[in-house]
Amino acid sequence: MTNLDDLELELRKLPGVRAAGFTERDDVLLVQVHVAGDPQAGAVPLQATRIACRHSDKPVTLEVVRWRVAEIAAPQPTDTVVPVPAPTGEVPAGAARERRVRLLAVLTFPDTDELEVHLTFEGRRIIGRASASDGALGVVEAAVDGLRAFVDHLELTPAWARELEVEPDREQPMVACQLTTADGAHRTGIATGASAIEAAARATLHALNRVLAPRLAEAAGTA
């Protein structure tokens, strides 16, 4: 029997490894390793494969996701999530790239254990809801709940979500998440935010916006 907790702990000790995720499909253990730009990270694929094989009683498939370092401006200090202005005006022809769902806010209500993710698309605003006690995964679930208002028959299952370790000089939390589609494909997103819950919502959109773009454009055209 595979102990995924022990496997994750050992994988995260490898140089440059920031996170690891696992999925079992067709009697195969799928291992996804997120690697930052560490100079020693070139040997990670081989080392990670060997570690996974030692821990797993099933065949192993490894996927390495390499991060690119980008400078991110620090946000203004705030006690709440800063709403993002909704897009206004006409969408020009050929600007399909701009037809994306935008995050407005992420709100939590501890007294009722509720969490809300506020989203907007083409001037339409919706709210997705989930349990606040589920943490980052609850944010992903709430975001998917909201996205179903924009895209009919959206079959997505949140697999995991977790806050990642960041460099000491980076003030913004970073969250990675993974969702599984109806055909078993995996969509992974990573994002930062003013808070961990905002980062989780942005990571969900990062994972899904590109794949949802054609369906969103179709929905906007038939509205």
Image (cartoon, rainbow, N blue to C red):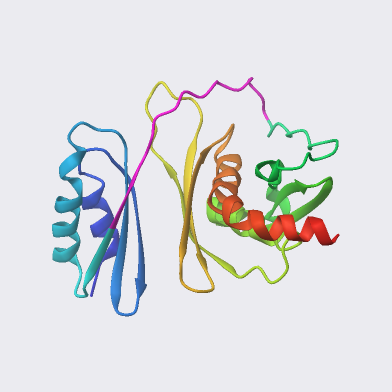
Which quadrant is home to the C terminus?
A: bottom right
Q: In the rendering, at what x and y percent does residue 102 appear?
A: 70, 43
What are the residue bounds of the magenta stretch? 63-79
The foreground one among 28 and 216 is 216
Q: Is residue 211 visible?
A: yes
Most common SS among magenta residues: loop
Badge count = 0
- The residue that appears at 26% across and 65% down in the rendered structure is 61
Q: In the rendering, at what x and y percent does residue 110 appear?
A: 68, 49
- The residue that appears at 61% across and 51% down in the rendered structure is 209
Q: In the rendering, at what x and y percent does residue 174 appear?
A: 48, 38
**The stretch drawn in magenta includes residue 69:** yes
The image quarter in which residue 59 lies: bottom left
Q: In the rendering, at what x and y percent does residue 5 appear?
A: 29, 59
Q: Is residue 86 above or below residue 209?
A: above
* In the image: residue 72, left or right of residue 122: left
Q: Is residue 105 visible?
A: no
**The stretch drawn in magenta includes residue 187:** no
* In the image: residue 88, left or right of residue 67: right
Which residue extends farthest front?
Answer: 93
The image quarter in which residue 49 lies: bottom left
The image quarter in which residue 85 lies: top right
* In the image: residue 163, left or right of residue 209: left
- The residue that appears at 50% across and 34% down in the rendered structure is 173
Which quadrant is home to the N terminus?
A: bottom left
Q: Is residue 181 above or below residue 68?
A: below
Which residue extends farthest bottom?
Answer: 26
Q: Is residue 182 above or below residue 190?
A: below
